[in-house]
Image (cartoon, rainbow, N blue to C red):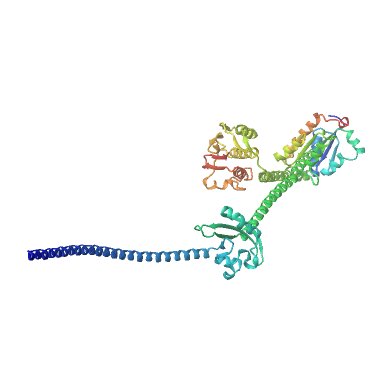
Amino acid sequence: MASHTNENTELGKLKQKIAGLEKLEQQHKKVEAKLKTVNKQLQASENQLKAYNEQLRESEQKLNQQKEAAEQSREFAESIIDTIRQPLLVLDKNLRVITANQYFYKLFQVSPESTKGNLLYNLGKNQWDIPELKELLKKTLPEFSAVEDFEVEYQFETIGHKIMLLNARELLQKQGKERLILLAIEDVTKSRIYKKELERLNKELEIKAEELQQILYITTHDLRSPLVNIQGFTKEMEASLNDLKKLLEKMQIHPAEEKSLNTIMDEEIPEAIHYITSSTTKMDNLLKGLLSLSRLGRQKLTFRKLDMNRLMQQVLDDFEFEIGKNQVNIEVGNLPDCMGDDLQINQLFSNLIGNSLKFLKPEVPGEIVISGGRVENGCRFVVKDNGIGIPREYQEKIFGLFEKLDPKKPGIGLGMNVVKQVVEKHNGSIEMESELGKGMKFSIFIPD
Amino acid sequence: MKKELKIILAEDDEGHASLIKRNLKRAGLMNEIIHFKDGQETLDFLFQGKKDKDEIKNVASLLLLDIKMPRVDGIDVLRKVKQDEFLKKMPVVMITTTDDPREIDKCHELGCSNYITKPIDYDKFVAAIRQLGLFLLIVEVPDLNNMI
């Protein structure tokens, strides 16, 4: 029994061992599976690491590219700043120069070495120690962060008198960094001198033009005065001649002398008188025209609302004699009120209507039609006649000074020039339509 | 018109003065015409010392004024006459070559009685002076003597 028991004991031990071995195997399998998983994880990690590495390399590449681009941009910006023909300064918050452009060094005759890192006020023998500039940069700029066209006039020791416009701007920096100031300096010394010179010349021109008008006025006026005498005493002489004739008729004169006496009394003296009179009349017309021209230049315009119906009636009343004599039919429409100078607008229409009356066709009854109406921003008036008209090739000339279309007609060729001047002084415009033999049509625009 | 009326003519151009005188006579005015060659002479006469002023006071006067004269011009004379307590009622007629409408307005503003332009056309000139003569024949010239 004992051996049986032993046998049983041995078997039990064996069974236990087998069980232990099985357990061990299981454990080993578990470890192996874990190992596999870890291995897999390890592989994945390696892959990831590789990917990270790749990314890192790409990023580095990008960074390098960006760095290069930034460098290029900086060079680009610097070359632009250096090319700008306007002095530029970058200052730190204590107004110490961080950088300046070429043109700054050139204009103010300082070197980069003596400029960079120095206080603005100490540059070039303290020549920038300008009270107004200090005020601008220390007080005004921090308050407004930008200042434009601040004018500084200063006598520099090295470069003399300068007028400058300063533009200052605070440069935006990321938080924590100190502010920078960009200071652009515009040298306007020359342009100011030119501007002043231009103003002076303009004033001189105005004075000269006024003087010229005055001279024109005085001379024409003074020239008319002697004409009164020439014309007057010529007529007086004519009257005396008639008296003389009557006296001579009563006297006994030798027949041989009578003939030459008659030639003198009836032909020679009257001819002389005729030419003196007609010449003085002609000269008077010239002077009258010049006078009215000078008056136009000298007059100060007084703009007011004009009752054009009334004004036109006044103009036509002045032509009553000519209109009646030539039996001209005048048609006047209802005219709108317009803004203008009373006398000058009167003169304008006088000249236009006078012109129409002068150039009517002798063979048909004359007709002048005057009309008007409101248009945008002003009034338009039309004066139309059925006169002889003018050929196209002369139409541009009619507004010129001393342009006469028909030398046989009275006048001196000023009327239309006056018309043009009046229209110009009113900022208006005038157009003419005409064809030879078909009359003329003037269209005048007078703005409000 | 009162017989004693004197015409004071201020005209720097002697020819014009002569033509004016001739034509006033032809128009029937036989009054004495005192001629001065510029504005200053005219003012000297009008504003002479108080003693001599009686001479002007005793006659009624009418002033014919040219505008353009050397030294003191016609507008200055007109202004001074119209500012004077004693002389301001004296009729003043402007006779001038200027037909500038603004110059005419100025004379009227200052108080001239009439304004005549000297036309170069002698017939018109004669007509203008004749009209002036007719105007003077009917106008009542105030007696300056009674004004003080």
Along the viewing direction, whichever of A105 and A8 lies nearer the viewer: A8
Residue B9 in picture, x, y percent from top left: 82, 39
Residue B101 in picture, x, y percent from top left: 70, 39
* A142 sits to left or right of A10: right
Image quarter (top left, top right, bottom left or bottom right) of the C terminus of chain A: top right
* B8 sits to left or right of A39: right
**Above or below for B107 versus B70:** above
Residue B132 in picture, x, y percent from top left: 77, 34
* A145 sits to left or right of B81: left
Along the viewing direction, whichever of A74 and A292 lies nearer the viewer: A74
Is residue B123 in view? no
Total marks drawn?
Answer: 0
Residue A437 in picture, x, y percent from top left: 52, 40
In the picture as drawn, the residue positioned furthest to the front comes out as A2
**Above or below for A154 versus A278:** below
Along the viewing direction, whichever of A201 and A420 lies nearer the viewer: A201
Along the viewing direction, whichever of A92 and B24 lies nearer the viewer: A92
Among the 4 quarters of the image, the one containing residue A224:
top right
**Above or below for A360 versus A26:** above
* A109 sits to left or right of B82: left
Among the 4 quarters of the image, the one containing residue B117:
top right
Is residue A12 in view? yes
Image quarter (top left, top right, bottom left or bottom right) of the N terminus of chain A: bottom left
